[in-house]
Image (cartoon, grey):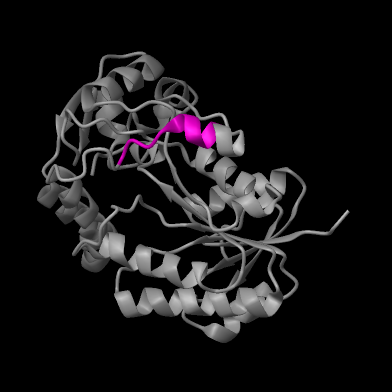
Amino acid sequence: MTIRRYLVTGATGAQGGAVARLLAARGADVRGLARRSRASPAGVAVHAGDLGDAAAVRAAFEGVTHAALTLPLEYDHATVVRYARNLAGAARAARVRRLVLNTNTPLPERPTDRPGFETRRAAEEVLRASGVPTVVVRPTVYLDNLHSPWHGPALVRDGVLACPLPAELPVAWMAHADLARVVVAALDREGPEMEGRVLSVGGPEALTGPELADALGRGLGREVRYVPLGVDRFEAGLARAVGAGAAAGVAGIYHHVASGRDPALLAPDPARTARTLGVRLTPAAEWAGAQRWERWAEAPAR
């Protein structure tokens, strides 16, 4: 049996952390790479290093056979391309057998003027041209974002779900745990048919805003109503948490969706994910019912 050693970038973050935890829970040999090594997932040895530091990236890749890549909230084009080139060079030098890139977002078919999309498209192009067998995973938006200080208190105390998405737009909201299962399946699925694949993934059901509110309400055990949030207001609030540059990158995605030019972008076919990878996706009501919402009962809303 061939020995596998996995590297997960962003292993102390939400998306990379979910991948690292799943691999570790399965008994895999997992190494993480993150800007800071604190709050390491159990069973994961996290190396501190920046993706912009080519030497640090190469050191993290030593002895690695499979790598799951998640990029940070960075939307400067030159910086993201440098990250991708450092990752590609290190993976090539280590003779990695499979890379899986999580783009953090779906990508429109045609180029746009939105850095949130185009920096990820550029990273994808660099890695797919690296000569290292690569699979790309393009996820939608995350249910776990709703279990946060920005949404949790309003959901629990007021029964309000406010999101920067049109109420009538169907969206296949996805759980981080499902993303992890998709990424790990893409890492481990043998055969040349996986190489070069681009997988648009989301949750098992495309829900409008009110349908999502109803699903969350069933999981919470209370009535929840959906309130469309203006994208500019969303961006201003996000900027206070992650900085203006990162907030503009994220908000650009919602501006694009709100324009109505790409109505199917956030609703990929869930059956394709099941057929390709054999992963069961979690319905929103089931996800909501498994969360510990009581933590937000007394927490201040943001």
Up-down relation of residue 266 to residue 246 (above or below):
above
Viewer-nearest residue: 16 or 127 = 127
Q: Quadrant of residue 240?
A: bottom left
Relative side of 119 to 251, left or right = right
Q: Residue furthest right?
A: 1
Up-down relation of residue 130 to residue 157 (above or below):
below
Q: How many marks?
A: 0
x and y percentages locating residue 103 in the rendered image: 42, 57
Q: Determine the residue positioned at 49% across, 27% down.
A: 282
x and y percentages locating residue 171 in the rendered image: 30, 33
Q: Which residues are magenta?
A: 266-274
Viewer-nearest residue: 118 or 211 = 118
Q: Determine the residue positioned at 25% across, 62% down.
A: 111
Q: Quadrant of residue 116?
A: bottom left
Q: Quadrant of residue 172?
A: top left
Q: Is residue 239 visible?
A: yes
Up-down relation of residue 240 to residue 222 (above or below):
below
Relative side of 121 to 111, left or right = right
**Magenta stretch encompasses residue 268:** yes
Q: Is residue 42 visible?
A: no
x and y percentages locating residue 165 in the rendered image: 19, 38
Viewer-nearest residue: 173 or 243 = 173
Q: Determine the residue positioned at 14% across, 34% down.
A: 228
Quarter occupied by the C terminus? top left
Q: Determine the residue positioned at 55% across, 32% down.
A: 274
x and y percentages locating residue 189 in the rendered image: 68, 47
Q: Residue furthest front?
A: 193
**Magenta stretch encompasses residue 272:** yes
